[in-house]
Image (tube, rainbow, N blue to C red):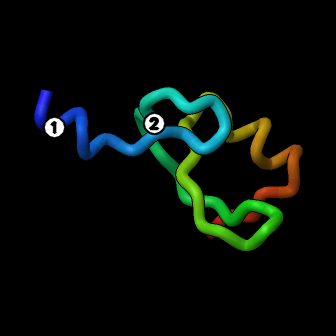
Amino acid sequence: MLFSLFQSKCAICGKKAVQPRKYLNPQGKAVKVCSLCVPYAERRAYRKR
């Protein structure tokens, strides 16, 4: 339970990011995206960090 506090969440779906990848959202903020949401992030003009 304690380690679940340090898990990062996906910026798109809000679930636990299993294999997070770092992207820059359109506002320029660095966010983590799970491996399932990567195609969606790239369609929405998120840039790889």
User: What crowding class fits label 2: few (fewer than 14 Cα within 10 Å), some (14-19), or many (20 or more)?
Assistant: many
- Can you say which quadrant of the picture contains the C terminus? bottom right
Specify the label residue 16 is tagged with.
Answer: none
| Mark toward the viewer: 1 or 2 | 1
Q: Quadrant of residue 41?
A: top right
Name the residue type under label 1.
Phe
Residue 42 located left or right of residue 1: right
Q: Is residue 31 above or below residue 19?
A: below
User: What crowding class fits label 1: few (fewer than 14 Cα within 10 Å), some (14-19), or many (20 or more)?
Assistant: few
- Residue 14: x and y in percent read 56, 32
Residue at coordinates 75% horizontally, 64% vertically from top-left? 47
**What SS does tag 1 mark?**
helix
User: Closer to the camera, 14 or 17?
Assistant: 14
> Badges 1 and 2: C-beta atoms under 8 Å apart?
no
Q: Earlier in the sequence, mark 1 or mark 2?
A: 1
Name the residue type under label 2.
Ala
Residue at coordinates 39% horizontally, 44% vertically from top-left? 8
* Residue underneath mark 1: 3
Q: Is residue 6 above or below residue 40?
A: below
Residue at coordinates 60% horizontally, 44% vertically from top-left? 11
